[in-house]
Amino acid sequence: MSETNETEDQVSEDDWAAAMGEQTAVDPAPAADAKPAAIFEEFSGGTENPAMPQGFDMILDIPVNLTVELGRTKISIRNLLQLAHGSVVELEGLAGEPMDVLVNGTLIAQGEVVVVNEKFGIRLTDVITPQERIRKLNR
């Protein structure tokens, strides 16, 4: 049985050597001064807004999560389990304070609650500039 394994190993090594030889004959190693083939087109876009980096328009249709944060608080599990219909949870934010607007967890603006056609909305009062938002993405 050991003879069979040795023969299989030898055939396998010979096959690999033959395949490597064929590859070298067909696809020789690139020269040191050779340039890579242009498989993909250059990543640059003709965006009209100078505040946006080139190629930025490619991601403009990607959906993100927008969150309006009314406030936060820390609560023990004991108190959490005691919550029932009609319970009031005190938040750290004060009434009338601007609320944070977050995109994927990153603060982008602050605003105040408005009601339009019986639906809640937010009126933005302070927006972080696009340059600052892009700078935060690079961090």
Image (spheres, rainbow, N blue to C red):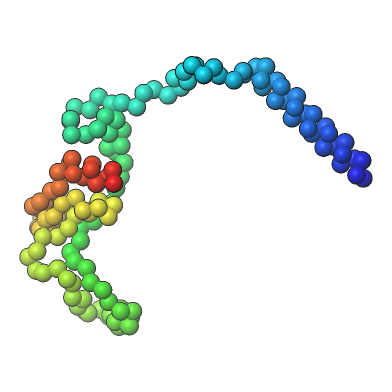
Please give the name of the residue rendered at 20% of the width and 61% of the height, measured from the top-left corner: 69
The image quadrant of residue 68 is bottom left
In percent of width and height, residue 53 lies at 24, 32
In percent of width and height, residue 39 lies at 46, 22
Q: Quadrant of the N terminus?
A: top right
Q: Is residue 94 left or right of residue 84?
A: left
Q: Is residue 26 left or right of residue 133?
A: right
Number of marks: 0
Residue with the most extreme front position:
32
Please give the name of the residue rendered at 49% of the width and 16% of the height, measured from the top-left corner: 34
Nearest to the observer: residue 5 or residue 92:
5
Nearest to the observer: residue 31 or residue 67:
31
In percent of width and height, residue 27 lies at 62, 18
Q: Is residue 35 left or right of residue 24?
A: left
The image quadrant of residue 13 is top right
Does 80 appear above or below 19?
below
In percent of width and height, residue 43 lies at 34, 27
Please give the name of the residue rendered at 25% of the width and 24% of the height, measured from the top-left corner: 46
Is residue 99 in view?
yes
Is residue 118 in view?
no
Nearest to the observer: residue 10 or residue 50:
10
